[in-house]
Image (tube, rainbow, N blue to C red):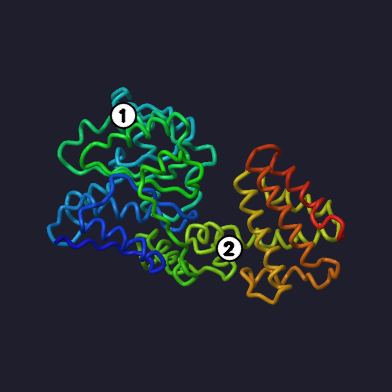
């Protein structure tokens, strides 16, 4: 019997055992949906699975060196991936349609760039823009290559499958109804509820769990050390306790917040204090300096703010803090009127602002200003 070994964090071992059993017993489904919070390693597992399915080693798979394994990790094999693109990228010409000698970026060039970034850091949460989507043309391009598959096993990874628009979802559903032999689809998503139920029902559902804090630190260090080709020049990388707290088990979020947490945690403290002191002019100036005009970045800051408010509730209850380095700086003891009820209402107000920003009903800057005015309303 061929042995299948999928390595990864211990917290997700149960999911990997389930997959390895299906591979050993030759009952692996032709479509699988891996879901879980953003940045916890869904794409990393998908790539390991693609290698295992395409590997030809007679004893242990994936071996990492056979033709199938090399093809699975070849960023130039763009037909093995479906990834969300923005409108301009999605309308780029294919290599076959570009005139000889043209220096224009083809859709294959664009996809290859994204695939290389995913292979470098499969946990990354900010790779695709908020307006990126999977179009019906991308799905048709994928199915159009099936005729050229030959007799080899074909694996297609559909990253962030919840970004398929309606036409793409319907086209992919038809494909799932008659999957070609030796063809496997691995879908990843952080929002499975946004996908067609009929697609979900045709896939084996696999839920990945968040990592422990120690695993988050370990995976982030491993990814960051791999970004330097010269080990002697590799920058020393260390996450703060607040970075790990914000991550909630996601290395991708930890790496993202490591870039911004110093600024945003300080701004979150300032947001609360200036709002309580009704120093709105000073707060508006601080928000302008932070340049949180993009919806995605504004909502990531509001995530930090909501974590901070939740930590203040934990502080009231004597529970462990997730942002120990930041929460103590608020000085909530200097505002005796702010009790657990006021903090819970403030948390709801932040969540409502995030929804408005995500729906584009108001601009991010306007929503942040409005939030500062209504935060702790009646308790100031």
Q: Is residue 76 left or right of residue 125?
A: left
Question: On the image, numbered disc 2 is attached to which residue?
Answer: 246
* Occupied quadrant, residue 180: top left
Q: How many marks?
A: 2
SS at mark 2 in the image: helix
Nearer the observer: mark 1 or 2; the answer is 2
Q: Is residue 211 left or right of residue 342?
A: left
Residue 329, how many percent across, how many down? Answer: 73, 70
Mark 1 vs 2, N-terminal side: 1
Instruction: Say which residue appears at 47% left-offset and 62% top-offset.
Output: 210
For the residues labelled 1 and 2, the Cα–Cα distance comes to 42 Å
Instruction: Say which residue appears at 81% left-offset and 54% top-offset.
Output: 282
* Occupied quadrant, residue 93: top left
- Is 348 above or below relative to 169? below
Residue 357, how many percent across, how many down? Answer: 66, 43
Q: Which quarter of the rendered picture does the N terminus lie within?
A: bottom left
* Badge number at residue 95: 1
Residue extending furthest left? 58
- Quick check: can you spot residue 76? yes
SS at mark 1 in the image: helix
Residue 256, how many percent across, how many down? Answer: 53, 57
Are there few (<14), some (14-19), or many (20+) residues within 10 Å of tag 1? some
């Amino acid at each position: 019997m061929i042995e299948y070994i999928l390595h990864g964090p211990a917290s997700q071992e149960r999911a990997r055992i389930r997959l390895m059993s299906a591979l050993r017993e030759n009952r692996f489904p032709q479509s699988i949906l891996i879901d879980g919070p953003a940045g916890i390693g869904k794409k990393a597992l998908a790539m390991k699975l693609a290698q295992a399915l395409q590997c030809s080693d007679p004893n242990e798979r994936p071996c990492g060196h056979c033709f199938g394994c090399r093809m699975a990790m070849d960023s130039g094999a763009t037909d093995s991936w479906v990834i969300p693109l923005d409108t301009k990228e999605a309308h780029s010409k294919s290599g076959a349609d570009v005139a000889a000698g043209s220096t224009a970026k083809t859709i294959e060039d664009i996809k290859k760039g994204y695939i290389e970034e995913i292979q470098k850091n499969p946990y990354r949460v900010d790779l695709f823009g908020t307006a990126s989507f999977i179009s019906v043309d991308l799905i048709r391009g994928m199915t159009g290559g099936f005729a050229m598959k030959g007799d080899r096993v074909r694996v297609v990874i559909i990253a962030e499958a919840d970004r398929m628009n309606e036409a793409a979802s319907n086209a992919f559903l038809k494909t799932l109804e008659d999957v070609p032999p030796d063809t496997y689809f691995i879908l990843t998503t952080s929002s499975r509820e946004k996908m067609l139920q009929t697609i979900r029902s045709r896939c084996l559902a696999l839920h990945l769990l968040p990592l422990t804090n120690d695993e988050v630190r370990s995976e982030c260090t491993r990814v960051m050390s791999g970004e330097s080709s010269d080990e002697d020049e590799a920058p020393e990388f260390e996450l703060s306790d607040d970075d790990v707290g914000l991550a909630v088990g996601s290395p991708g979020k930890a790496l993202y917040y490591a870039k911004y947490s110093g600024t945003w945690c300080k701004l979150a403290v300032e947001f609360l204090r200036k709002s309580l002191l009704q120093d709105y002019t000073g707060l508006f100036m601080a928000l302008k300096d932070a340049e949180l005009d993009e919806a995605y970045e504004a909502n990531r800051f509001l995530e930090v703010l909501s974590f901070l408010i939740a930590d203040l509730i934990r502080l009231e209850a004597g529970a462990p803090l997730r942002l120990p380095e930041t929460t103590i700086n608020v000085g909530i003891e200097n505002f005796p009127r702010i009790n657990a009820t006021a903090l819970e209402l403030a948390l709801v107000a932040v969540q409502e602002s995030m929804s408005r920003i995500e729906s584009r009903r108001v601009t991010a800057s306007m929503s942040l200003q409005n939030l500062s005015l209504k935060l702790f309303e009646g308790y100031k």
